[in-house]
Image: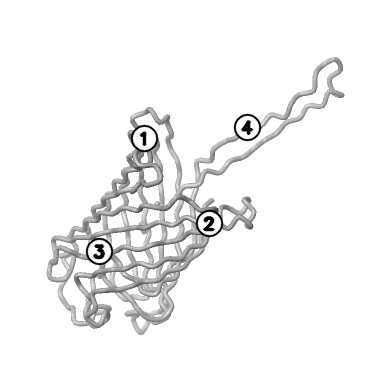
Amino acid sequence: MALIKNLTLGAIAGVLLPASLFAGTESKAVVETTTKSIIAGDLGVNFVSEYISRGVLQEKQGVIAQPYIDLFLTVYEGADTDAINKVTLNVSAWSSFHSKHTGASKDSNVSSWYEDDIIPGVSVTFLKNWTGTVSYAEYFSPSNAWDVSRNITLNLAYNDTDLLGAFALHPHVAYLRELQGSAPYGTSYGAVIDGYNKAVNGHGNYYEFGIAPALPAFGPVTVSFPLNVGFGSGDFYVDNKGFGYFSGGATATVALPFVPTAYGAWAANAGVTYWRLNNPNGDLAGGDQNRVVYQAGLGVNF
């Protein structure tokens, strides 16, 4: 989920001292000061035609809604010339709701709530353009489709805008270490993955490499082209396959300027992504390793 989206908020105060109150003095000009907020965030919801998690197909039918919220707290901010430029604490919540009640247990009271993720972390921006993030994640299935999965993720991103300008690639690399359960499967293959009853050791490794180039903004429209490839080891994927997936697509984001800025910066998005899966995920994918996923959503930065 990431995929990370800060927007700084400002407060403007003006003071006018009329001359009539101070005989023989000049009237004071309006003084404006801007204070940067240390708290920012975003929230929204995306609708997808299929839910694929790190190259593993989870659901391909029905309505799939995926709401999210991210909160960021800046605890330190220095100058661009400093070795450490910024330190941010963050916490994210992400869910996936399925109208098909994917893998839900018969006694579940929330059969549509397939997944709920809670992800706290800390990000450090250093040497101006590098950002490293350490996150801890707990993945739950409120519908009891699978057991809890706990993981640690390290992510390193580079902002190459200074080098390539409008043609910046925004590369990143990520490493995930399973602590308990399987990140792509939970700890119950058979509940969702037809034909797989293999025990999960919960100590697999996941590696991701990606770029996200974008076209220069055309009015309120921005188009990005995220490309990602994922690999696994230590039984992260079924039968310990190394290559997990390749994905590439295009996403258009349209700002909604008619919404008052007091309510945040709203935007709508739509996109399409092609996935090449190494593991077609049993009968769920019908053996098809090539998937095309459509998405549309609405979100706000604040």
* Mark closer to the chain start, 3 or 2: 3
**Label 1, on which residue?**
128
Q: Does dot 3 land on a helix, a strand or a loop?
A: strand
Q: Are marks 3 and 2 in contact (CB under 8 Å)?
A: no
Residue at 39%, 62% in the rendered image: 250
Identified by mark 1, the residue type is Lys
Identified by mark 4, the residue type is Thr
**Label 3, on which residue?**
246
Q: Position of residue 242 (x, y in %)?
A: 14, 63
**Label 2, on which residue?**
300
Q: Give the mark toward the camera: 3 or 2.
A: 3
* Mark closer to the chain start, 1 or 3: 1
The one nearer the camera, 22 or 287, is: 287
Q: Does dot 1 land on a helix, a strand or a loop?
A: loop
**Label 4, on which residue?**
33
* Mark closer to the chain start, 1 or 2: 1
Q: For the residues marked 1 and 4, what is the alpha-carbon distance in whole angstroms?
A: 26 Å
